[in-house]
Image (spheres, rainbow, N blue to C red):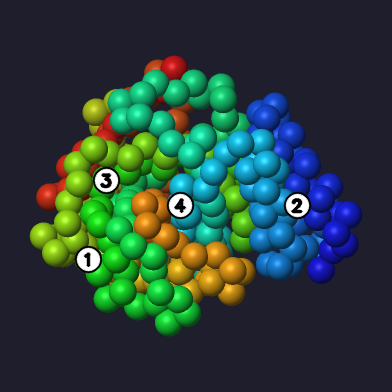
Amino acid sequence: MISDASRREAAQALATAERERSAIPPLRETYPELDAVDAYEIQLLQIRDKLAAGARVRGHKVGLSSKAMQKMIGVDTPDYGHLLDTMFVDEGSALAAADFCFPRIEIEVAFVLGRELPAPGCSVADVLAATDYVAPSLEIIDSRIDGWNIRLFDTISDNASSARLVLGGTKTKVEDIDLRTLGAVLRKNGEIMETGASGAVLGHPAIAVAWLANTVHSFGVTLGEGHVILPGSCTRAIDVAPGDVIRGDFDRLGHVSVKFS
């Protein structure tokens, strides 16, 4: 564990890296005693600063919930981060790649809650009953750690590498589909880059949402009505660069796209 002063120093370094698009060395190297408690406190310090500046929490995300992403980063457990209103962008928007350090993109089934999730003890059945609808989404992730040289505590500190979220406009009721078997295709400039199925997220994406509700409850956080919850990517993330057009397609769930300039 590291000191409160070191936590604040790390939070400020990450905030500066995000603001100036200038990545920093891995926190695990700068602070060898860094642990999970430190990492989540570093994340919260940044979130509190953003809320004080006028942002508001619009949801949460689960990161590293599929074997593909765990293997890509070299971890074996999920993490979570906050989704702020400032992160949401319209479908079909053009984003400047220069606004990020090392942007990558993921395809996910987004859950939009119709009521608060019960916790502790939240189950898949609770998640499905509380979900207003699901929608296709693209999450732009970014690492303020140089070259994506991260391990679990680095990405937790960095708000689970969150950056932006594009929420598709098609709304689907959970009772109308099988969330375990939805096929997903991620395309860049028309070329298929990744394929997968929604069940790659812990066997069922609602399992990830239930895990999140139970995990954040211990920090006094609830997942409430209107919150957008991202359960994690069902494929590997892909790199993006200026000029790229990204499209995500889900069977029976619709598509969503974003451009980079």
For the residues bearing labels 2 and 3, Cβ distance under 8 angstroms = no
Q: CA distance from mark 3 to mark 1?
A: 14 Å
x%, y% of residue 257? 29, 32
Which mark is drawn over residue 27? 2
Q: Amino acid at mark 3?
A: Pro
Which mark is drawn over residue 136? 3
Q: CA distance from mark 1 to mark 2?
A: 36 Å
Q: Amino acid at mark 4?
A: Gly
x%, y% of residue 91? 31, 30
**Image quadrant of residue 35?**
bottom right
Q: Earlier in the sequence, mark 1 or mark 2?
A: 2
Q: CA distance from mark 2 to mark 3?
A: 33 Å
Looking at the image, which residue is at 84% across and 47% down?
9
x%, y% of residue 195? 26, 49
Q: Earlier in the sequence, mark 4 or mark 1?
A: 4
Picture layout, residue 132 above or below residue 85:
below
Q: CA distance from mark 4 to mark 1?
A: 22 Å
Which one is in front, 168 or 183?
168
**Quick one: SS at disc 4?**
strand
Q: Nearer the viewer, mark 4 or mark 2?
A: 4
Which mark is drawn over residue 31? none
Which residue is disc 1 drawn over? 180
Q: CA distance from mark 4 to mark 2?
A: 26 Å
